[in-house]
Image: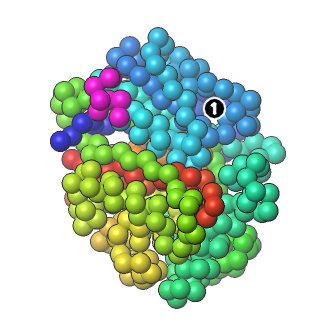
Amino acid sequence: MVLAAVIGVGMIPFGKHENRSLVGMGAESCRMALKDAHINPDRVDAAFFSSGLAPKLFGDFTVGQNVFWEVGINRIPVVNVENACTSGSTAFFLAYNMVAAGQAEVALVCGAEKMCVPGFGLISSGESQLDTQLGMVAPAGFALRAVRHMEEYGTTKEQLAKVAIKNRTHGGLNPMAQFRDPITLEEVLAAPMIVDPLTRLQCCPIADGAAAVVIASPSVAARFPRSVNAECAVLVTGNYENPQDLANWETDRRGAQTAYEKAGMGPEDIDLVECHDAFTISEILHYEALCLCPPGEGGRLVDEGAVALGGRVPVNPSGGLLSRGHPVGATGVAQIVEVVMQLRGEAGPRQVEGAQAGLAQCMGGDKDGDTKSCTVSIFSV
């Protein structure tokens, strides 16, 4: 039974917006989503804002109230969300559940981030974490997973590089993407090494950006012919009790399995996927956790073109984080915007033909060899 639906989406291009404020970017995406939904601001019952870095970079707290008041929204529950890279998808999870529980008929979710600022450093799980103090920043953690996957399954550097090439090709079709020029295998492999085997072109870029979605109850959504059903929204936390297999992400697989069960669907029902390709190895691990292929065969999936536009299940038709960019608080919402546009048949040259169901997956933070958060949401028409 469908408990909520997306009736409007909005997004600004990701990139370097030196002359734009965090609040201004977020407000613009909200206006776009409300206009797309044909909803007035006073119709919104609750609003959720996500930013992973605003308090750290700007000393700003409760930014959501400022963003939503820019579009004329006040006197309602407003929740500010920080959950690393899943900040936006966690905000969606909270809004979905509020609507599904009947506590709101219409909810607005906005994710925004401004990262192209002086002094911005490496993303980590926090300076209080011992792993971070010892150098376990994001590129290092994913490089370890890449080396382990290559050792255990024979995944090659070329297969890793092909993920970046595919997503740049997809991004070239997306006017919202930060990087749109094609890249070659030779360019990816020859790019400056960040952490072996991940070169710079295999690591997602930072960006400024914002995205928003409007969620409504089934009774409200029934009046909107372009609404997209939200079959489920799942949030899970990592397992910190037992040593983790770096080549097989149990938390990722657990989140996906929970989502499939809640939606009453399986991987064979999914027509497209937006996933957290912060690094090329990330996407390969997600293929396997989402059961798009058996463990160890993610590299083969790239070789065969199964995850490219025109393939069996296109992954990151938006260009993903590797091409679109990764403004942390906006990313999870932007993934949902892409899935909704695809299911409405509005993705233009990157449209997945006949798409009826799509999945958005995101991960955030590292702790004791596992992730701190993982979200999986499934949508259908």
Q: Position of residue 36 (x, y in %)?
A: 35, 31
Which residue does the image show at 35% across and 34% down from the upper left? 97
Name the residue located 59 percent from the left edge and 76 percent from the top edge: 146
Q: Where on the picture, by quarter, is residue 214?
A: top left
Q: Which SS class for mark 1?
A: helix
Quadrant in which residue 354 is drawn: bottom left
> In x, y percent, where is residue 46?
41, 22
Q: Is residue 116 left or right of residue 218?
A: right
Q: Is residue 160 magenta?
A: no
Q: Please give left or right for residue 77 compared with residue 160 in the image.
A: left
Where does residue 61 sit, x and y in percent of width and height?
66, 26
Residue 15 showing in the rendered view? no
Between 4 and 19, the one lying in front of the other is: 4
Which residue is nearer to you in this view: 238 or 97?
238
- Read off the magenta span: 97-104
**Residue 141 higher or lower than 276, as above or below:** below
Q: What's the coloring here?
A: rainbow
Residue 67 against residue 333 in the figure, above or below: above
Circle 1 is placed at which residue position?
A: 22
